[in-house]
Amino acid sequence: MNFSQQLIAFKTIMVKEYLRFIRIWVQTIIPPVITMALYFIIFGQLIGSQIGDIDGYRYMDYIVPGLILMAVITNSYSNVVSSFFSAKFQKNIEEMIISPLPNYIILAGYISGGVARGVTVGITVTVVSMFFSDFQIHSLGITLAVFVLTSILFAIAGLINAVYARSFDDITIIPTFVLTPLTYLGGIFYSIKMLPEFWQTVSMANPILYMINAFRYGLLGVSDIDVTTALVIIVAFIIILFTLALSLLNKGVGIKP
Amino acid sequence: MSVNALKIENLKKTYRNGTVALHGVNLDVMEGDFFALLGPNGAGKSTTISIISSLTNKTTGKVQVFGHDIDQDPATARSMIGLVPQEFNFNIFEPVIEILINQAGFYGIGRKVATQRAEKYLRKLELWDKRFDMAKELSGGMKRRLMIARALVHEPKLLILDEPTAGVDIEIRHSMWTFMREINASGTTIILTTHYLEEAESLCNHIAIIDKGVTIEHTSMRTLLDRLRVETFVLYLEDPLSKAPICGDYPLKLVDSNTLEVGVAHSQTLNEFFHLLSECNIKVLSMRNKTNRLEQLFVTMMRDGNAENYSGVQA
């Protein structure tokens, strides 16, 4: 396939994936928005009003970046894991495997679908958060970079999960037992400076901490982590996971007997 | 020099659980051929097809599509193949036309051309009125036709049909046969697997039979059918008989008072037989082959376990 044919193929997967989650917007867009609105009301307004400022920001404002990024992480991941696993389950992944599509185009196509959903939900949640918080964007470049890079990273992670998954249970195990705890412990609701020194050190091993803090820096200008270090870590994870995912697709793991 | 549409040499496949599906399959399919790939359930037909179309990794062996090795030049080889698999494998939640346009997109065909081709093949396969329906809403026969349309949308040179008419009613099956003949006549090489042996006999020029993961027969349909030395015909009589008559050296058997069976060797003619029946004042209302010829050969080959033991079979 020449470059223009590859571009057509990429656009085909991207549009197909976009239409997939838009078609079922009641399941894909609305629930995370409602969940985040409840977080804003309960943790931000009701409980947050009883908590003092953190790093000079109201508690409501402080948790907004983390909650937006949590929506991005969850939706990028779940879009790809459910879409790719469904394609495996219904066997329509074979439509791509028998075609001359290179595997990196398949991978890029699914990532683009994950990013599209992550960004769509992220923007929607951001709009909702404006009803509760009047934050100003500190650095648009860093905000957008973290927004998109995080989305890419978790879209790839979702695909790797789907490659290994053999049942619908397998696509919920990682989000439930790994992703959610890491996200909640990644500093959405608190600054790690509030933790004892030991737990601060332990928290540094959580990659999601870097993303949330970098995103918080982009929006509010405050972070527990050096932003450059955070960006380097996110990009490094993307490179590692992309290479792993491509290698799995090339070997046909979970797809070809 | 003409290139084979498909060339398979010593293809072997052992699955991870140790099951050996293919022990060494060899196939040559000429360009433009209508080729039957037959075998009992579990013989290795679908594994062979899956390897040709890159859905399964082979263990060893060589597969070339129009001279392009599936390992060394996979993209070119794949671009020449259209596959209609045995099981439905489209997204049931997508509209029919989107399934075709997306499939074309995977081959790098732009949306405008893809839409034109989707219309062409959906009309040919009588699915145009259903183009905006979700695939899950189609009947079984329509789903089969959708998979044929999808396999053709990138206009492959080699079309592989894995039991395309399974579960399809007779009327639609016949219209699909006509369509397949048209596609073949336009230059597309077709490989067909089917359990309807009448279908294979009617459509195909060459045939290979796989059993237990090896090719046990690979020849032209005519050569294979010529090996039937005797065909059995069933005759329906106007007047009842009490016992089988004697008509020259034709073996006759009275099935019931109005039904006779006769074995006619290739060296004999039906004219001579009917002449003898007339002399005996026996009037025939109608007649038919007792069984489909290919079916009889196939059953005997599977029963005897090899290709050499069936040449004397009587239908």
Image: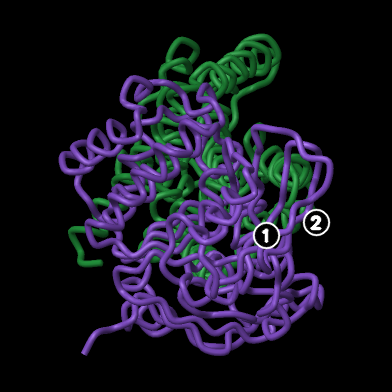
Chain colours: A green, B purple
How many marks do you count on the picture? 2
Q: What element carries label 2?
A: helix
Q: For the point 42% across and 21% down, which residue is it? A: B133
Q: Which chain carries label 1?
A: B
**The C terminus of chain B, quarter of image:** bottom right
Q: What element carries label 1?
A: loop
Return the residue nearer the eye: B84 or A74.
B84
Q: Position of residue B197 (x, y in %)?
A: 58, 56
Q: In this view, does B134 lie above or below A38?
A: below
Q: Position of residue B46 (x, y in %)?
A: 61, 63
Return the residue nearer the eye: A233 or B71.
B71
Amino acid at pointer 1:
Cys
Q: For the point 34% across and 75% down, which residue is it? A: B5
**The N terminus of chain B, quarter of image:** bottom left
The residue singled out by tag 1 in the image is: B247
Q: Where is residue A185 in the image (x, y as percent from the top left)?
A: 71, 42
Q: Position of residue B215 (x, y in %)?
A: 62, 81
For residue B59, the mark is: none
Give the label, 1 or 2, closer to the camera: 1
Q: For the point 68% across and 20% down, which residue is it? A: A51
Q: Do we see residue B314 in this rendering?
A: yes
Amino acid at pointer 2:
Phe
Q: Do we see residue A194 in this rendering?
A: no
For residue A198, the mark is: 2
Return the residue nearer the eye: B224 or A248.
B224
Residue B77 occupies which quadrant of the picture?
Answer: bottom left
Q: Mark 2 lies on which chain?
A: A
* Category of crowding for the residue at label 1, using alpha-carbon neighbours closer than 10 angstroms: few (below 14), some (14–19), many (at least 20): some
